[in-house]
C-alpha cells in the first residue's frame, strides 16, 4: 500500500513537469505572441509607399503659327483719277495718315459750285419768307423755294463728303501689306486702294485638345518659342467656346508684343502654358483603379491597417506617372496587392522599397 502511494506521487509530479515544459503554463506575453501570429496569418499582405503632397507645375505645348492682329482693306470712297500714293509696300503708317489720294480740282470746283448755289437759294428763301409773313407771296411759291433750299443744303453736304472721300487714310497704325492701284489710274468707288496690317501685338494661333482646354484662362501667361529663337512672353487673349467639329479641338490665341515688327506673320511657333497644381501626389499610374460606381481612385492603408478606397482627380498623366489631388497631405498608398483587397479589410502592410 505504501509502495502504491509513492508511485502515484511520482506520476503526478511527472505530469506536472510535462505540462509546464509544454508551454501551456507560461506568461501572458508568450500567449499574446502566439495570438498575434495567428491573427497575422489570416491577414493578406500588401505593399505600400509613403506619399507626401507637393506643388506640381503642369506644362503642355501647343503648335501654332503667327498671324496679324488685324488686316484692313482700304477702299476708294468715290470715283476719280489717282493723283498720289504716299507709301510703298512694307512701310509703317500711323493712324490718320493719307495713303492715296484722287485728283482734287474737279471735286473742289463741284464744292464751290454747291456752296454758291446754297447761298443763292438761302437768300431767295429767306427774303420770300419775310414777304410771305405779310401775305405778299403765295404758299405754293414759298414751299417751292423751301424745297430748293433743302436740296441745295443736301448737295453741299455731298460735295463736302466727296472732297473728304478724295483721300484714303489709315484707320489704325500698321504696315502697308499691299498697294492695289497706280498713279494716273481711274479708280472707282469701292475699289481696294491698299491693304493695311497691324502686327503689334502679333498673334500666335494654335489648337488645343479637349483634355487640356479646361487648363486655359484668358490673360493667363504663356511662353512662345519661334524656330531657332529664345522664349518670348505673351498672354492668352482668346479661347474659342466651340470645338472644331472635325478635329474636336479649340482655337487659342496668344498675343506677343512686336513693336519693331521683327516677328513675321506666318512663322511656326510653339506655345507653352504652365499651371501650378497645389497639394498633388505623384503615383504610379498602374495603381489607379475604379470604384463600383466607375469613379477613379486609389486604395490606401489607414493608421489601423484598414483598406480604404479614395476617389482622386487626375491632374496630369505622363511618363513619370499620375499626378493626383483630393488626398490628405501624407498617405500610405497600396502598390502591390490592391486587386486582392477591398475597403474595410485589415491587412498586413509592408513598405514597398521598390516603389
Image (spheres, helix red, strand yellow):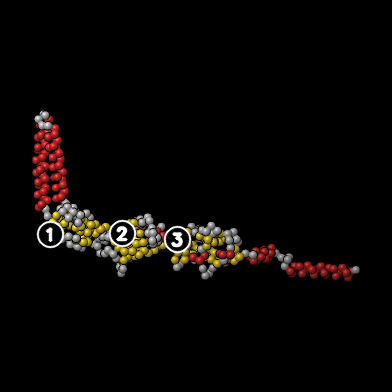
Q: Residue at x 10, y 40 (%)?
A: 121
Determine which of the numbered discs, if any, sits on residue 315 in the image. 3
Label 2 crowding class (10 Å Cα cut-off): few <14, some 14-19, many 20+?
Answer: many
Please say if 289 is above or below 156.
below
Disc 1: CA contacts within 10 A as few (<14), some (14-19) or many (>=20): few
In the rendered structure, find residue 302 and report the number of the disc placed on it.
none
SS at badge 3 = strand
Cβ–Cβ below 8 Å for labels 1 and 3?
Answer: no
Q: Marks 1 and 2, Cα distance to the nearest angstrom?
A: 40 Å
- Label 1, label 3: how far apart the Cα atoms are: 65 Å
Q: Quadrant of the N terminus?
A: bottom right
In this view, the residue in front, 240 or 203, is 240
Residue highlighted by disc 1: 184
Question: Residue under circle 2?
Answer: 255
Percent coordinates x, y for residue 98 in the rendering: 17, 55
Depth order, front residue of 11/118: 118
Asked if one can make out residue 50 in the rendered structure from this viewpoint, the answer is no
Task: Inspect this view and state whether residue 301 appears.
Answer: yes
Please tell me which residue is depicted at 14% across the width and 59% down the height of the picture: 185
Disc 2 secondary structure class: strand
Amino acid at each position: 500500500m505504501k509502495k502504491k502511494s509513492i508511485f502515484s506521487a511520482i506520476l503526478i509530479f511527472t505530469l506536472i513537469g510535462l505540462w509546464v515544459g509544454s508551454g501551456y503554463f507560461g506568461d501572458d506575453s508568450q500567449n499574446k505572441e502566439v495570438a498575434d501570429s495567428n491573427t497575422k496569418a489570416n491577414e493578406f499582405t500588401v505593399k505600400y509607399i509613403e506619399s507626401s503632397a507637393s506643388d506640381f507645375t503642369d506644362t503642355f505645348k501647343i503648335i501654332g503659327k503667327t498671324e496679324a492682329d488685324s488686316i484692313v482693306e482700304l477702299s476708294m470712297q468715290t470715283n476719280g483719277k489717282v493723283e498720289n500714293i504716299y507709301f510703298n509696300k512694307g512701310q509703317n503708317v500711323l493712324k490718320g495718315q493719307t495713303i492715296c489720294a484722287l485728283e482734287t480740282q474737279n471735286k473742289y470746283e463741284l464744292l464751290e459750285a454747291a456752296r454758291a448755289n446754297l447761298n443763292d437759294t438761302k437768300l431767295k428763301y429767306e427774303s420770300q419768307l419775310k414777304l410771305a409773313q405779310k401775305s405778299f407771296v403765295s404758299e405754293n411759291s414759298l414751299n417751292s423755294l423751301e424745297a430748293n433750299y433743302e436740296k441745295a443744303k443736301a448737295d453741299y453736304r455731298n460735295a463736302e463728303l466727296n472732297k473728304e472721300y478724295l483721300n484714303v487714310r489709315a484707320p489704325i497704325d500698321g504696315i502697308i501689306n499691299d498697294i492695289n492701284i497706280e498713279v494716273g489710274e481711274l479708280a472707282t468707288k469701292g475699289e481696294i486702294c491698299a491693304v493695311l496690317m497691324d502686327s503689334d501685338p502679333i498673334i500666335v494661333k494654335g489648337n488645343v485638345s479637349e483634355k487640356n482646354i479646361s487648363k486655359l484662362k484668358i490673360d493667363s501667361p504663356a511662353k512662345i518659342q519661334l524656330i531657332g529663337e529664345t522664349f518670348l512672353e505673351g498672354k492668352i487673349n482668346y479661347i474659342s467656346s466651340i470645338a472644331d467639329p472635325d478635329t474636336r479641338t479649340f482655337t487659342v490665341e496668344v498675343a506677343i508684343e512686336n513693336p519693331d515688327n521683327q516677328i513675321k506673320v506666318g512663322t511656326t511657333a510653339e506655345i507653352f502654358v504652365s499651371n501650378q497644381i497645389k497639394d498633388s501626389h505623384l503615383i504610379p499610374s498602374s495603381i489607379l483603379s475604379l470604384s463600383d460606381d466607375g469613379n477613379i481612385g486609389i486604395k490606401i492603408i489607414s493608421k489601423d491597417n484598414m483598406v480604404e478606397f479614395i476617389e482622386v482627380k487626375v491632374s496630369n498623366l505622363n511618363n513619370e506617372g499620375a499626378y493626383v489631388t483630393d488626398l490628405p497631405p501624407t498617405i500610405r498608398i497600396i502598390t502591390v496587392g490592391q486587386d486582392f483587397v477591398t475597403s474595410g479589410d485589415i491587412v498586413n502592410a509592408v513598405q514597398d522599397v521598390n516603389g
